[in-house]
Amino acid sequence: MESIQNQKSLKIAFVHPDLGIGGAERLVVDAAIALQNAGHNITMYTSHHDKTHCFKETLDDLKVDVLGDFLPQSIFGYGHIVCAILRGFYLSLYLLINKRNEYDVIFADQLATYIPVLKLTKAKILFYCHFPDKNLATRQSTIKKLYRIPFDLLEEYSTKMADKILVNSQFTRSIFKESFKKIDIVPDVLYPGINTKYYEKNIDENDKNLDLLKSDKITLLSINRFERKKNLELNIKVLKELKMKCSEEEFKNIRLVIAGGYDLLNIENVEHHKELEEIAKANEGEKEKIEEVNTKESIQNVNIIFLLSFSENQRTYLLHHSQCLIYTPTNEHFGIVPVEAMYSGLPVIAIESGGPKESVVHGKTGFLCPSDEKELAEAAYAILYPNKSTNNNNDKYKIDLTSMPSYAKEYVINKFGLDQFGKTLNHIIYEMYNNNNNNTSKKENKKEL
């Protein structure tokens, strides 16, 4: 095979349902940027792109075309999967009719049902599976179980048609193999990468959006979308446990910032934020929604802050001015936030399951704990007050906070840096493209013979 340096640049399309703010979106944007930097011609296609709720690169650095946003995302809150498939079908049908011979490779993710239509183009299809959709669906009733059967079959059939399948972690690969018994292909693991330059940027201290975040208090940070599966309420329970562990003076100096993706059009985001506010009240936590606070003085008196969506500058500020990141999802598929935190020198406390087991190094870059508020509070106290921490867990929660930042930074660069991610992805793209082209050529030669 030719060396990558001698290979021609490729025309690559990315198709993604909704270019909002989330881990999946971060990955596809980083993948697009990495391949664009490698010399490829990149266009992103999506069904929805809110320019006030998206990553900056999709505005400044990438060509983005929106197709089918006039189609509903749900029908009175129901039929999300049907609507997602219809929107995806419209997008992929557009590419088939108008761009049939345009692209060498199409990178699809999240929605496998794009693939049967996209396979009718001349492009090779790479599918990145963040997690099998059939495992994300709820099935509380018999009707829902029956309702999901055709979609589960369609997902497996569609996924099987991809020329190459990638997953984001060994954990996801194990679930993939259990979920899709009819797919013989064993997916390759490609860990998401982070663009480290965005975490090296100087903080704009004159940004008025930082005024209400600035505080001398110790900050426990949670970054996640406002979704129930992210188990955000566990953060509030951890704070309550810390209140019992700490002296009154210690606890007065602690605050919890729950920051994350929030879209007013997303019913679950809105509902779950309200639920978390009620949980905060029930746990006697003072809470504020930062958009409703008008003075710095008022926010200094609270110990729970909800930051509904955030700017890049706010994120950078929080990552560099917090003392600990608490990451509460169980069986998270990968979880890019702990990687971002570790690169920023922030110790991570994560649940000992799923992707974080592959990213967080216990005792070196943070702690892996059971999904239990007492355990998490113990770990948090060990980070916040290392000289006062007393536990009976045989030094389970001990970490060298002096060496941790430099160790974590180097570790992330070597394992999760965008350069490494881009090189690996570029190699996979060329390998898939050349192998499939070679196979096609052999078939054509056989026909001629």
Image (spheres, rainbow, N blue to C red):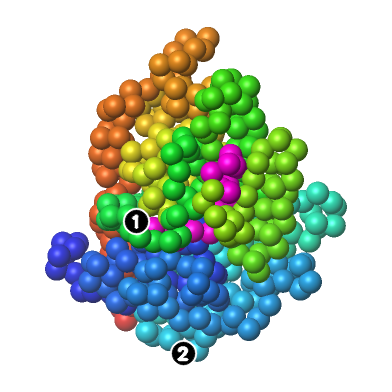
Q: Quadrant of the C terminus?
A: bottom left
Instruction: Name the quadrant of the N terminus.
Output: bottom left
Residue 125 in the image: x percent, y percent?
Answer: 43, 68
**435 relative to 1 in the view: left or right:** right
**Residue 62 belongs to magenta span:** no
Chain part drawn in magenta = 298-313
Mark 2 or mark 1, which has the lower sequence index?
Answer: 2
- Looking at the image, the residue that sits furthest to the right is 142
Q: As shown in the figure, which amino acid type bears the numbered disc 2?
A: Asn
Image position, residue 144 (x, y; %):
80, 56
- What residue is rendered at 27% in x and 28% in y? 403
Residue under the image location 59 percent in, 80 percent down: 69
80 or 53: nearer the viewer:
53
Q: Is residue 20 left or right of residue 150?
A: left
Which residue, given by chain and number where applicable, does mark 2 sit on?
98
Q: Is residue 81 visible?
A: no
What residue lies at 72% left-to-right and 56% top-to-bottom? 271
Q: Tell me the element at label 2.
A: helix
Where is residue 17, by image quadrant? bottom right
Q: For mark 1, what is the residue?
A: 205
The image quarter in which residue 102 lies? bottom left
